[in-house]
Amino acid sequence: MKPGLGKSCDESMTAPPFGGRALVVFGGDTALPWLRMLKPGFRHCFVLVERAGGWVVVNPLSHQTELAWLERREAGDLANAYRRHGFRVVPYAVIAAPPTAAPWRPYTCVEAVKRVLGIHHRWVWTPWALYRHIRGARTQKNTY
């Protein structure tokens, strides 16, 4: 038990079930010089996860992670809105991660997105590698 909490965090907090749809968004704009060595168009990524009533946006930046809530929108409309702003969007099904610790990696946008999606692939560590991985591993059709 944690001091002052009564119940353990595991007992009092429940996570939403695994699964559901996600939109993984890739972009190429950066103000950080060291990111310019990455493939153009694939210098940053973030993820939107569908939950009841809308979408949770997880945007891991170098100085903080932004969280946002978007009210109910159709996945295709949302994906097209990002595409109109120059982003590449790939749908993906959120999966339950293996019940082992993820491989250790520095905290990057890719690592944060991988954790949200349930991906533990060791060699995926750039936005371009993540894009290639999810395009190859997708089990759902791109209907957005």
Image: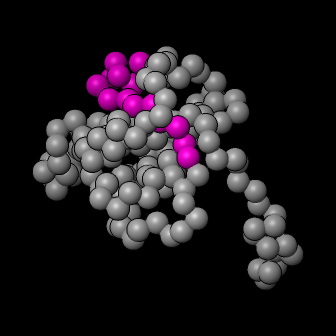
Q: Nearer the viewer, residue 21 or 107?
A: 21
Q: Is residue 89 magenta?
A: yes
Compared across the picture, whether 34 is left or right of 104 comes to left
Q: Is residue 62 visible?
A: no
Look at the image and tell me in which quarter the N terminus lies.
Answer: bottom right
Q: Is residue 25 magenta?
A: no
At x 44%, y 58%, the residue is 120
At x 38%, y 57%, the residue is 121
| Number of callouts | 0
> How was this image coloured?
one colour
Q: Position of residue 40 (x, y in %)?
A: 17, 38
Q: Considering only vertical position in the picture, is 95 above or below 21?
A: below
Q: Residue furthest right?
A: 6
Q: Nearer the viewer, residue 84 or 128?
A: 128
Q: Is residue 58 visible?
A: yes
At x 44%, y 45%, the residue is 59
Q: Considering only vertical position in the picture, is 6 above or below 52?
A: below
At x 85%, y 73%, the residue is 7
Q: Residue furthest left?
A: 37
Compared across the picture, whether 125 is left or right of 101 comes to left
Compared across the picture, whether 34 is left or right of 86 comes to left
Q: Considering only vertical position in the picture, is 123 above or below 22?
A: below
Q: Position of residue 11 (x, y in %)?
A: 81, 67
The answer to which quarter of the image holds residue 124 is bottom left
Q: Nearer the viewer, residue 64 or 79?
A: 79
Q: Position of residue 54 (x, y in %)?
A: 64, 30
The magenta segment:
79-95
Q: Considering only vertical position in the picture, is 26 above or below 13?
A: above
Q: Position of residue 63 (x, y in %)?
A: 38, 58
